[in-house]
Amino acid sequence: FTPFQQPESHHGLYKICCLMRHGERLASIIDVSDIHRSVHLFPNFSAVVPREWTSSAVLELCSSFVVNSFSDRHAYLTIV
């Protein structure tokens, strides 16, 4: 995913996008000790959510998300 930029002005959440190269997603294998915490992602969509976006498929089908910094107190203090 892309690194955080400025939070979105209308809700204050950070938008992230899938990184792509030559039409394929970029991915990395990282050491488990580099993971600090999980985050809650909301798919970024307009007025209508596509029907094919199920909980098991949305990470593959959606190209941008917002990071929910309000999921818990620690996330709010860490992300914001």
Image (cartoon, grey):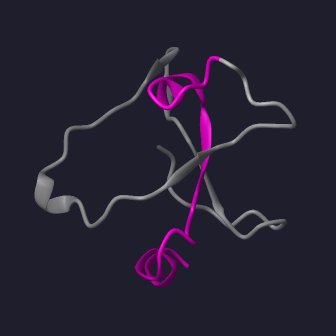
| 33 and 52: which is toward the camera | 52
Question: Residue at (52%, 14%) from the top-left corner?
Answer: 23
Magenta segment range?
Answer: 52-80
**3 in relation to 7, above or below:** above
Quadrant of the image occupied by residue 54 = top right
**67 in relation to 53, above or below:** below
Quadrant of the image occupied by residue 26 = top left
| 54 and 27: which is toward the camera | 54
User: Is 18 positioned to the left or the right of 30 in the image?
Assistant: right
User: Is 69 positioned to the left or the right of 50 in the image?
Assistant: left
**61 in relation to 67, above or below:** above
Measured from the top left, where is residue 38 in percent x and y?
Answer: 34, 59
Question: Residue at (42%, 58%) from the top-left corner?
Answer: 39
User: Is 31 positioned to the left or the right of 28 in the image?
Assistant: left
The image quadrant where one finds the C terminus is: bottom right
| 49 and 67: which is toward the camera | 49
In magenta stretch: residue 6: no
User: Is 14 positioned to the left or the right of 60 in the image?
Assistant: right
In magenta stretch: residue 58: yes
Question: Residue at (20%, 38%) from the top-left corner?
Answer: 29
Measured from the top left, where is residue 20 in percent x and y?
Answer: 50, 27
Tally the marks. 0
Measured from the top left, where is residue 68 in percent x and y?
Answer: 57, 62
